[in-house]
Image: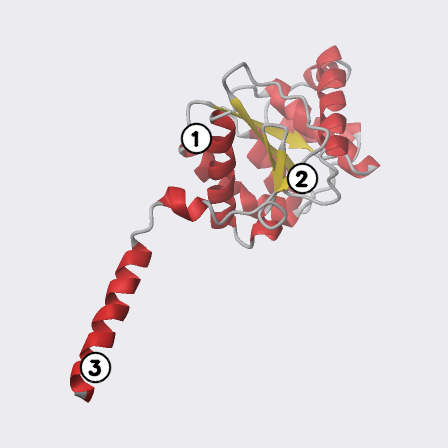
Amino acid sequence: MKRTLSHTLGFMMAALFALTGCIPEASQAQDFKEGTHYVTLSPTIPTQAPAGKVEVIDLFWYGCPHCYSLEPTIDKFLSNKPDNVVFQRVPATLSPRWEYHAKLFYVGQMLDPDGAKRVHTKIFEALQKQRRKINDDDAMTRFFAELGFTSDQVKNALNSMEMKAMMARANEVGIKSKADSVPIIIVNGKYRTSPSMVGSEETLLQVVDYLVKREAQQ
């Protein structure tokens, strides 16, 4: 009798584990809860994505080691990005130092618009791995000169109307997202989440996917 009962319980537990392992991703996504895995922003942040597209923003700072460690996860997201997603990196501007690094990012974006020279990655490596100080125009000019850009190109980018518009956008995103730390991911100007909030970078991708699909259905 005991052997029969033990065999029956073992079969039931095995069946339960099998069923648990076969739960569809859509069902698992229902476990993502507001206040636990993401927060809803109010007011929302105006997006720059075309109609029918969902905007995903990575709010970061070059001086943040957590932002640097998140880069492979961001690359993973981009390699599998749905066609309806418009992705943007937006630099946080929470202090004068962060604001200057935001200008550094946008100069890099203007000089390397298609990412062919991997300027964004090289800036991260310069600050995070090489511990370089790029906190003024001279240091910035020297850095970009090493990448093959002229001082005039850097100066023109810094003083451009495009720079002013992009910095205004960065300030708007930072203020309206109520960000007090980074990295943060913002989905369609409505939802904010982060690795620290959800517990892991892998879960972060799942939450972002869930929120993107939710917005696509609106």
Question: Mark 2–mark 1 contact, CB under 8 Å?
Answer: no
- Assess disc 2: are there few (<14), some (14-19) or many (≥20) residues with their C-alpha within 10 Å of its C-alpha: many
Give yes or no for contact between labels 3 and 1 (Cβ–Cβ under 8 Å).
Answer: no
Dividing the picture into quadrants, the one containing residue 165 is top right
* Rendering coords of residue 74 (x, y %): 51, 38
Residue that lies at the very extreme toward the top in this rendered image: 161
Which residue is the site of mark 2? 62
Disc 1 secondary structure class: loop
What amino acid does circle 2 point to? Tyr
- The residue positioned 71% from the left and 32% from the top of the image is 42
Camera-side residue of 95 and 133: 95
Where residue 71 sits in the image (x, y, percent)?
54, 41
Picture disc at residue 5: 3
Question: Residue at 29% across / 52% down in the picture?
Answer: 22
Can residue 70 be seen here? The reply is: yes
**Disc 3 vs disc 1: which is toward the camera?**
3
**Residue marked by disc 1:** 81
Mark 2 or mark 3: whose residue is earlier in sequence: 3
List the single residue furthest toward the right.
96
Q: Nearer the viewer, residue 187 or 218?
A: 218
At numbered mark 2, what does the secondary structure look like: helix, strand or loop?
loop
Mark 2 or mark 1, earlier in chain: 2
